[in-house]
């Protein structure tokens, strides 16, 4: 077992910097810098989400970063949950502000305020918007690069308003399906679970989360969908006129993802050396490395340049590394550590045979391809790679979900870096007992309808009606 499993956070921190994705040395705790290569990766990932949201009738907006104290405090449950994590702006220049301003920790309050002003009648509904912004949370636990930060710099938050609870629940299912498609596109495996009541988002009637598993066996929540009902609309008096001319409060949802998605891509698709970036989001899909020999150096460089121009013309994200000072071996290593999915090697023999050698980052399989077929073969290989990376990730993920029938077994499973699947009678008291007695966390229960089974709840011994996912989490 290597550093990646044994000491995941340190491995991640090193890999993020070596791959030139994210520099976590910024001198404010919990804040990091997206480097140019990492920023491109981030953009490619966000664009997949944007497409999915735009296609389903969401529109992008941009709200102010600051939220007045009175606005943030208007819904009681919400502020109770967030109070300990809010950063406050209290001064403007030399003077004290009359009204303290919060750096948004999330945007339910400012969105509901705008919805109240924007929505007049049932004809304005449903309303579906999203933004990709920074949110700030004063984390008191240890911060971790991309995983637990004080400035969440890639927060995609969506907000919707509906005329009826039926329509809001329909949207709830749509949001889950959008996230499924998003994580499927990235090959990230997940479990979808309903949070137990004390673990829901502050102000939500139901919270469903997507969790994946890190190489050290800890669960990482990578997406969440909240059914807010009328809690915010009642607190903010956000009403609309129904078809019959009556006034009613709107029904709302919110759902979000963050840069934890990027952390999962790197955690799930990687080896000891570093990331193996999925070809659909990799900033560089193909790197061309010329292998010059004495006498034919000029010809090899020229040939590599010709291949570069051709692949670029075919709209592949390609980079030519023709620095004569660096050896091909050192270039291979460098680009593997940066996670580039495919390498094209160009040597004298490739030149002679009118082709190039294609090498996969994940399996290191080599394939000689004729020049005329190169672009097509690269596209085909990228599709195969993405599919195989996804299958491998799911296999490893499923191997980390293990049934546990007693409290002792839960301990065994979690110590072995896995998530325990525990039969549960449905009593909240038993769920609390499981957390208290094992010291581990309940991620949630599956969305499917409860039904009696022969398995027994490990606390009370009654028949179970569903299961709980129990493990360690970030
Ligand atoms: Zn029980």
Image: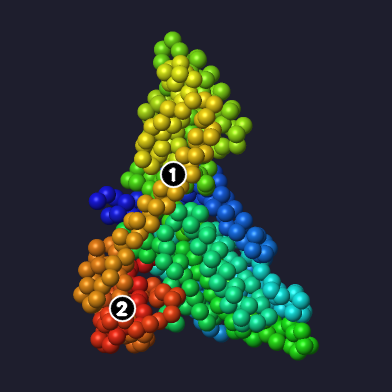
| Residue sitting farthest toward the right | 245
In which quadrant of the rendered view does residue 240 lie? Answer: bottom right
Task: Say whether residue 158 is left or right of residue 189.
Answer: right
Q: Position of residue 37 (x, y in %)?
A: 52, 43
Q: Is mark 2 within 8 Å of ligand 1?
A: no
Whichever of labels 1 and 2 marks the residue nearer the N terminus, that label is 1
Which residue corresponds to the image point at 56% horizontal and 23% vertical from the top-left?
306
Q: Is residue 461 above or below residue 386?
A: below
Q: Nearer the viewer, residue 388 or 153?
A: 388
Q: What is the total number of numbered labels drawn onto the structure image? A: 2
Residue 96 can be seen in this image? no
Q: Residue at x 36, y 40 (%)?
A: 363
Residue hosting label 2: 423
How would you rate the neighbour count of disc 2 (Cα within 10 Å): few for under 14, some for 14-19, many for 20 or more?
Answer: many
Residue beneath disc 1: 385
Q: Is residue 112 left or right of residue 298?
A: right
């Amino acid at each position: 077992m290597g550093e990646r499993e044994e000491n995941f956070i340190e491995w991640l921190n090193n890999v993020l910097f070596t791959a030139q994705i994210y520099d976590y040395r910024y001198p404010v705790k919990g804040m990091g810098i997206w480097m140019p290569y990492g920023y491109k990766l981030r953009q490619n990932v966000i664009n997949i989400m944007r497409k999915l949201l735009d296609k389903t009738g969401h529109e992008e907006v941009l709200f102010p970063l600051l939220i007045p104290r009175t606005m943030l405090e208007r819904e009681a449950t919400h502020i109770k949950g967030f109070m300990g994590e809010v950063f406050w702006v209290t001064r403007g220049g030399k003077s004290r502000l009359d009204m303290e301003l919060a750096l948004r920790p999330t945007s339910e309050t400012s969105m509901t305020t705008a919805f109240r002003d924007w929505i007049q009648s049932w004809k304005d509904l449903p309303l579906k918007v999203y933004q990709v912004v920074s949110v700030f949370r004063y984390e008191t636990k240890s911060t971790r690069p991309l995983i637990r930060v004080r400035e969440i710099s890639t927060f995609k938050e969506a907000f919707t308003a509906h005329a009826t609870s039926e329509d809001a629940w329909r949207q709830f299912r749509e949001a889950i399906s959008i996230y499924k498609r998003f994580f499927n596109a990235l090959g990230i495996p997940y479990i979808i679970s309903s949070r137990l009541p004390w673990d829901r988002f502050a102000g939500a009637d139901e919270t469903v989360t997507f969790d994946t598993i890190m190489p050290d066996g800890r669960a990482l929540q990578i997406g969440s969908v909240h059914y807010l009902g009328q809690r915010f609309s009642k607190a903010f008096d956000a009403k609309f006129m129904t078809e019959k001319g009556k006034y009613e409060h709107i029904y709302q949802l919110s759902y979000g993802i963050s840069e934890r998605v990027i952390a999962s891509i790197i955690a799930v698709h990687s080896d000891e050396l570093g990331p193996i970036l999925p070809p659909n989001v990799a900033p560089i899909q193909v790197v061309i490395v010329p292998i010059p020999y004495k006498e034919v150096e000029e010809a090899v460089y020229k040939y590599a340049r010709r291949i570069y121009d051709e692949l670029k013309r075919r709209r592949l994200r390609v980079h030519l590394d023709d620095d004569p000072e660096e050896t091909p071996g050192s270039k291979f290593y460098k680009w593997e550590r940066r996670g580039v999915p495919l390498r094209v090697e160009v040597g004298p023999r490739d030149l002679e045979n009118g082709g190039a050698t294609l090498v996969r980052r994940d399996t290191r399989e080599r394939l000689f391809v004729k020049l005329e077929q190169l672009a097509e073969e690269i596209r085909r290989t990228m599709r195969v790679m993405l599919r195989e990376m996804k299958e491998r990730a799911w296999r490893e993920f499923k191997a980390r979900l293990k049934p546990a029938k007693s409290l002792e077994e839960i301990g065994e499973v979690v110590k072995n870096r896995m998530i325990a699947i525990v039969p549960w009678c449905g009593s909240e008291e038993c769920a609390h007992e499981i957390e208290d007695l094992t010291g581990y966390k309940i991620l949630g229960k599956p969305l499917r309808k409860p039904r009696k089974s022969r398995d027994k709840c490990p606390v009370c011994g009654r028949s179970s009606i569903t299961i709980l996912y129990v493990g360690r989490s970030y």
